Image (tube, rainbow, N blue to C red):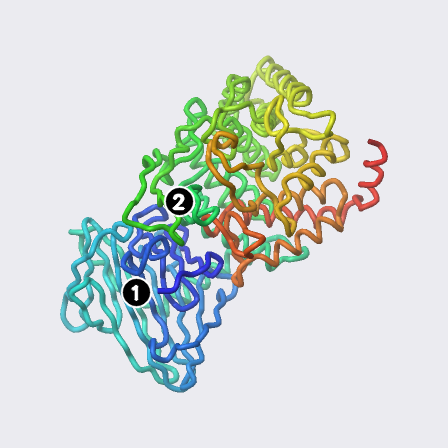
Amino acid sequence: MREPSIEELAFLSNTRAAALTQSDGTMTWLCLPGFASPAVFANLLGTSSNGFWRLGPAPYTTTSLESRRRYIGDSLAVEYTWDTGSGVLEVTDFLPAPDATGYAPATVVRVATCRSGVVRLASSFRPRPGYGSLTPTMRYIGHGTPRLRVTGGDETYWLDAPRHTVKPDGSASCDVPLKAGQSLVFALTFTRTGTPAPDQLAGTTVLEETQRYWTRWASTCTYTGAHREAVLRSALTLKGLCDLDGAAIAAPTTSLPAPVGGVRNWDYRYTWPRDTAWMMQALLSLGYTEEPTAYRAWLTTHVDPDALRPLYGLGGGPVPAEEPQPHLRGYRNSKPVRIGNAATEQHQLDVYGELADLLAQMDDAGIPPCPAADDLLLGLALKAEQLWEQPDDGMWESRGTPRRYVSSLVWAWVALDRAASVLGRHGAADQKTLLRLAATAETIHAEVCARGYDEERNTFTQYLDGRDLDASLLHIVRVGFLPPDDKRVIGTIEAIERELGAGGGMLLRYPTRPDAADNVDGLSGHEGAFLATAFWMVEALAQIGRNADAGELFDRLLAVRSDLGLLAEQYDPAEGTHLGNYPQGLSHDGLIRAALAIAAASTGPAADGQAALAAAER
């Protein structure tokens, strides 16, 4: 079976689970009932023997046939169209949206329709529960319209579809003629083994309800500026990464490599408070308040500042221990494939600041205060005050020696600064505490400016008393640590452009070298360009008045999106391919922020001439 490029994949979600399909109609990744559940189709990380489901024109009609595909309107339902020569076949894939009570069935639906002429529809169904490790038993159950029951371990799936021929190897297939106007519905539903069979869905009705759900949600976006279509598609992608219980995943996949053949393969199907805070800020900036409010409730329920973890399970519990899956060869033979994530044990100082920044932005947006959120904000600030002088693992989750990262210290400053401001407004802390927090923030600020700044090169550095750069330093201007016309801000942006450029306007997160001992992250080899950091550069350029440069870079970044408007974690400028887990929340958050920064710069007093003035003042 052909191995797809990462950008070829389409993303399906119902804010509870996710699937990925490729352009030939093959579902190559499906996790039910939740984002982090074991995949029943894991072909993406292995071979066809690890599970897939292809639905499309019969194979003998597709020698050189290519599909056209699109998201249907402002939704996460994907429509594929093939012109077979004898007729036109359309297949629509989707996960049914939540109902009014918040219930979303653990089902994926595929609706096949002959739009004209005559076509032959083929289904090739090879489920493999347990991340492709189990060959299931398959048996038709019931009378009248029997259902195919697929059981592997504690996972059972029910296929409601035209009758398939079941084969001894644990696969099934069907080949059905369709005339113009005829439709067939295929639905696969998850249950726990031993529980009752699920209700059957009315596929076309559920499709209409799902389209209405996404269209209603999209219609409330308040952004009306340039590139609105791209911004809205990124917002829909972020919504698709949100979980109904309030948190959000970083990406719906594990172990898509960055780079191919390397060891930087991680499981992103959990919630990182940092990533989720940024994603919620992006949604809030577009007028969405429901998701940030739900996340605030999730935080006050599950997060203890005295025991803050870098990542959590979506239910608020711990993330599984990191384990390799040797039965999976990895995407394009990139091993290991990992389930779980060891970063959950790290100390990452920046997280206190990112959560505090979100709570402050929600307050600025007029979302009603919440006593539990004020308690959380105070706890985050007090813990940052306690820990800021200790080395940490940084926002990039270094697996090397802990250091005093400048970006971590900047975000610790944010935690104290935002807490002093918001809690002061709310009267939620005593004056003595507020003054102490403000004083500690000033101390951190002075430390960063004294030891995290290389005066000779006019740039901030990756960690105190170091020389390497880090793209996360671009946040210095975002969070207001220094004003955009400060020579140190402008110098840092220029140094990152110069020293971390990866070609095509792309940026590395930080320098990497062949030997792990020489890399700050403790890993060997290099990685691709990190897409979010390129969007951070757009944002920073707009903030310092380099509007033309910001707009040009933004257009170049928009051009690397997939045909469906999706972005992975990283990009290889030389190969022109996406790398890493997909779609990546941080990349889409970055796109939204960049578009908003350009819009703000184009309507405000900033202009390219200001950059020249700032340079002259240096």
Q: Please, what secondary structure does the residue beneath circle 1 have?
A: strand
Q: Please, what secondary structure does the residue beneath circle 2 have?
A: loop
Residue located at (33% from left, 57% from top): 43
Q: Is residue 423 visible?
A: no
Residue located at (62% from left, 20% from top): 444
Residue located at (68% from left, 35% from top): 477
User: Marks 1/2: CA distance?
Assistant: 24 Å
**Horizontal arrangement in the rendering, residue 414 relative to residue 198 (left or right):** right
Q: Earlier in the sequence, mark 1 or mark 2?
A: 1
Which residue is label 2 attached to? 269
Q: Position of residue 526 (x, y in %)?
A: 51, 41
Name the quarter where the C terminus is drawn. Answer: top right
Instruction: Determine which quarter of the picture holds residue 565.
Output: bottom right
Which residue is label 1 attached to? 187
Instruction: Determine which quarter of the picture holds residue 416.
Output: top right
For marks 1 and 2, give the one nearer the viewer. Answer: 2
Residue furthest out toward the front: 515
Up-down relation of residue 317 to residue 305 (above or below): below
Residue furthest out toward the top: 432
Q: Position of residue 405 (x, y in %)?
A: 57, 26
Question: Front-most of 104 and 566?
Answer: 566
Given the image, on which type of amino acid does mark 1 rest?
Ala
Question: Front-most of 372 and 320?
Answer: 320
